[in-house]
Image (tube, rainbow, N blue to C red):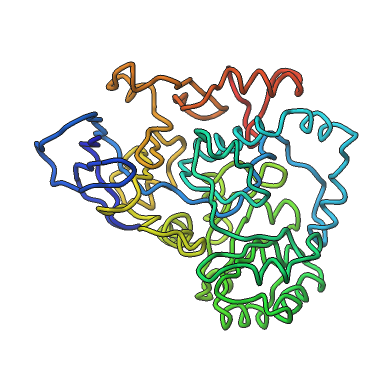
Amino acid sequence: MFLTGARIALDAGRAEPRNLEIAGNRVRALHPPGPTNRNGLVLDLGGHIVLPGLINPHDHLEFNLYPRLGRGPYPNAASWARDIYRPDQPPVREHLAVPKNVRLVWGGLKNLLSGVTTVCHHNPRELPVFDRGFPVRVLKRFHWAHSLEFSPDVEQRFHATPAGCPFILHLGEATDPGGRRELHRLDAMGALDSRTVLVHAVALGRKELDLVRRRDASLVWCPSSNLFVLGRTLAGPVLESGIRIALGSDSALSAEGDLLDELRVARSVSGLHGSVLYRMVTEQAARVLCLPGGAGRIAAGGPADLVAVPDTRRAPSAALLACVTPRLVTVGGRIRLIACDLARQLPASALEGFHPLTVEGRETVLVKADVPRLHARASASLGGAIRLAGRKVLV
């Protein structure tokens, strides 16, 4: 497949006109603009900029049809969890009645609609679902625990984690002193090193952050979730500390929308330059998750995980922050999402299995998923209209 007519993002601040050639699941070459020897599908992306597929290092995929739950702020996430978990009462009861595999696919679609091509699902891996045409790539190679509060075997799980593989857990999701002490408990277990990825970490003070830096651990920042549950999130000194930080969406239980929404929240609360945020969902996220083979950037030989967005004629990072709806997403060289006008360039055979999907406030796109069936199975339990990451799904 050839993608022509677009600017290709070479890094956060630079994009140049190129013809992008895909072979199998990799980028074969970036050709100068102009005629090339083309075999196979050709897609003209004039007026677009092609970015590396976004990487979401933190989500709970089965919870993205839920509304936000709770009335914060809470002193810690454990208090929030105990408050919202009422499985015999609405709305939790009705959402639990939706088959889990259906909820997981909707979580994948939430990520796809925001240009995510790789997501880390912070829950047990559902192999039958994730390995059969799932909308996005779900991270396989990582070890995890929920938290020190809810996982009594954190130490054993960490020490079973091989070198070069991330170990991910919620930590410091609090504003009380207990949240700060969690890091020292983890370090006393010998479970804080370059493999460790701490999700949220709002409670950590200067002393704890110095320890994170010395141990070469990483953080995942989820600002809208933090603000909803705790009333605060990471501040400038943390974000500029030199610690590896990736930006995650969390789930609809606590977050405001998807990863594109999270980028805008992060920008508004931090004032960070767009190029810093861009790297938090591309190259930096790839480093935090120890992804191999050029993930998080576009280069010959790298993965053909790509997202095309409208070209604002500015830097790639500015185009990403301005994006409302991605217009093309490829995962491993396969089209998973395409705008309706772009789809007219494709033969009918290339669109088998695609269905239109519209969510509130977003452009209608075609996605490689059985949307009518998924909608019917979810709405049967939820009473008609459903919402995905807070947005009404229109059928």
Image quadrant where residue 179 sits: bottom right
Pick the residue in front: 36 or 259.
36
Q: Residue at x 39, y 27 (%)?
A: 339
Judged left or right of residue 363, residue 62 is right
Query: How far across and down, in percent of the image, does residue 131 sit?
Result: 53, 39
Q: Is residue 53 above or below residue 67?
A: below
Query: How far across and down, in percent of the image, does residue 306 sit?
Result: 36, 43
Q: Is residue 50 above or below residue 363?
A: below
Q: How many marks?
A: 0
Q: Residue at x 27, y 35 (%)?
A: 47
Pick the residue in front: 42 or 100.
100
Query: How far across and down, in percent of the image, does residue 225 sit?
Result: 68, 52
Judged left or right of residue 190, residue 30 is left
Pick the residue in front: 231 or 358.
358
Query: How far across and down, in percent of the image, does residue 378 sit?
Result: 69, 24
The C terminus - image quarter: top right
Q: Residue at x 57, y 51 (%)?
A: 120
Q: Is residue 130 above or below residue 314?
A: above
Q: Residue at x 49, y 40 (%)?
A: 136
Judged left or right of residue 109, residue 309 is left
Image quadrant where residue 99 sits: top right
Image quadrant where residue 204 sits: bottom right
The N terminus - image quarter: top left
